[in-house]
Image (spheres, rainbow, N blue to C red):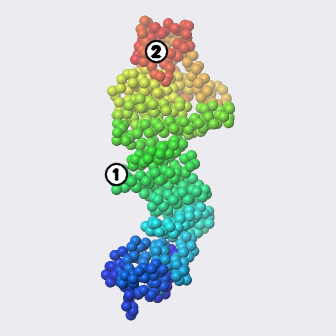
Amino acid sequence: MKYMKLGSKPDALQSDGKFVRYISSELATDIIIAVGDVKFDLHKFPLLSKSNHLQKLVSKANEDNSDEIYLNDFPGGPKAFEICAKFCYGMTVTLNAYNVVAARCAAEYLEMTENIDKGNLIFKIDVFLTSSIFRSWKDSIIVLQTAKSLLPWSEDLKIIGRCIDSIASKTSVDPVNITWSYTYNRKLAQVDKIVEEKITSKEKIESVPKDWWVEDICELDIDLYKRVMITVKSKGRMDGVVIGEALKTYAVRWLPDSVDALVSDDHAWRNKSLVETIVCLLPCDSGVGCSCSFLLKLLKVAILVEADELSRKELMNSISLKLHEASVKDLLIPARSSATTTYDIDLVQDLLNRYMTNEKKNCDSEIVEKKDKVFGESILGNRAILNVGKLVDGYLGEIAHDPHLSLSSFVDLSQSIPDFARPNHDGLYRAIDIYLKEHPSLTKSERKNICGLMNVKKLTSEASAHAAENERLPLRVIVQVVYFEHLRAAANAQAFANSLRDPPRTLVNEDEEYEKTTVKSCHSLNRQTSRMKLKDDEFRKSVKMNKSSSKNSKSGMQLLPSRSRRIFDKLWNVGKGQGENRSSETSGSSNSPTSIVLGDTKSSGSSLRHQRHSIS
């Protein structure tokens, strides 16, 4: 810390209790100056030789035949006046970052200018501020902190403005040129780690990080912090990521962790002001500067402290730009007291709508630039939309436990993303299964509606095996799962057989190969169904042969569970019945086995529509 010593005489100012100060001297004192509750017994001559204001006050006191002067609203109080009095007597005074602002304001009040005496206190303090304080990083921050209690004097004297400019200028300095000390706990932790690993001293020299300054300015009050950050941003030399890190560090420093502390009457206004200030300071870089996790946590706090609508809207827009970076935990925002659900579902729905609107705009602009691109291909070119798909399914799995979650909310949220954002339906199946388990009172139509969200063809083998044994699913869905799992097994077996006959091929599109093999299996199965000449034992024998073939080929196909096999056999045998009406239950996302057969055997198999039994 920088300091400056003034005067050379020993300190002769004594105390008589808490409220009396006097000069220990052979000469009797001839004036009493009251500053607040403290009275100073002093001599007129040394004071009047330095202070123009005291000259005026003493002259007026003499006219009133009084030897006592009252200094009302004296900046800095008795301590600041004591510094000025000692300077007038030539006693030793030490100025530093903690008392220099108070001394400067007191000197201004007393009009200790160069017109009264050369080298007066105002001049000496201004030299100290310019040559030392404003050149020191930590001293500038300390002076700025102490200046707030001395408003409006410190503002009028431009001390606050000069401190802010000094701090902002130093934050913009190239880290390579920084030679002053600063607080950086993460750097200290890294140094400790280096010492433990016994790395040489030459390797211990680390470059100064770009965010070296963020922790030091966290001690400023929110008003001063806002002014510093605005000045830092106005210089245009600070990276948005560093700005975001500074705001995050300040929020962590001052926002309490507990909800009760956030909304308590003692701190509610301060917390609201803090959140609104941080939001207005967010970098204007399309949300790049701050992480999505931090923005969502800030949104939670903004809702709790009832921040203004504009702040919440800005947060929502920033979050929607990078929703693909969020985690399920981040989205679990508690619902307001008036809501029936545990979490704020409408808020997440709004975020998803904003995100998809932004993605659509981005892709439209790409289409204008590149005519050969379409919307789906443009989005699939990056992983962002796929991450959102996983995020939505994970979020659905969490909120599905809520017994008060309506079916319409679940369906709407599931349908907020396009089909290509969900190439795998395992996560959606898990969420649907949880919802069915937690809501056993759903009607048959409602169960059909929610299961219609799922495409059984997009389930993995593990999920299909679970679904085939899941009694909570409608029977038609289970049949579809078993059917398509059978097709997958046949396709895998055929693919393995082809690989044994043909030389290995490179750069084969797996999806196209799968579709071709599946189509072959469908045609083969359709021919068998149209003839209706296979006996039950022949069909079981062919199924066993397929299982054996897939097992020997190490294709990874799992055997169908016994319950699922019985269902599939039942479906096969039902096709032989006559004159029965077929069931109306079906899944909205996949075709049933029989519907596929009818599509390919329109002429010869049209009568089969009236021959199927209901298996629902």
- Seen at 45% across and 86% down, the residue is 46
Q: Residue reaching furthest front?
A: 63
Q: Position of residue 336 (x, y in %)?
A: 37, 41
Q: Residue reaching furthest left?
A: 17
- Seen at 50% across and 51% down, the residue is 280
* In the displayed structure image, the side of residue 407 where residue 181 appears, left or right: right
Residue nearest the observer in this picture, 318 or 441: 318
Res. 401 image quadrant: top left
Res. 29 image quadrant: bottom left
- Seen at 43% across and 37% down, the residue is 346
Given the image, on which type of amino acid does mark 1 rest? Asp
Residue nearest the observer in this picture, 166 or 423: 166
Q: Residues within 10 Å of mark 1 (few under 14, many from 20)?
A: few
* In the displayed structure image, the side of residue 369 where residue 36 appears, left or right: left
Q: Residue reaching furthest bottom?
A: 26
The residue tagged 1 is: 260
Residue nearest the observer in this picture, 531 or 228: 228
Q: Position of residue 128 (x, y in %)?
A: 54, 76
Q: Position of residue 308 (x, y in %)?
A: 44, 47
Residue 558 is tagged as none
Given the image, on which type of amino acid does mark 2 rest? Trp
Q: Position of residue 372 (x, y in %)?
A: 68, 31
Residue 572 is tagged as 2
Disc number lying in front (1 or 2): 1
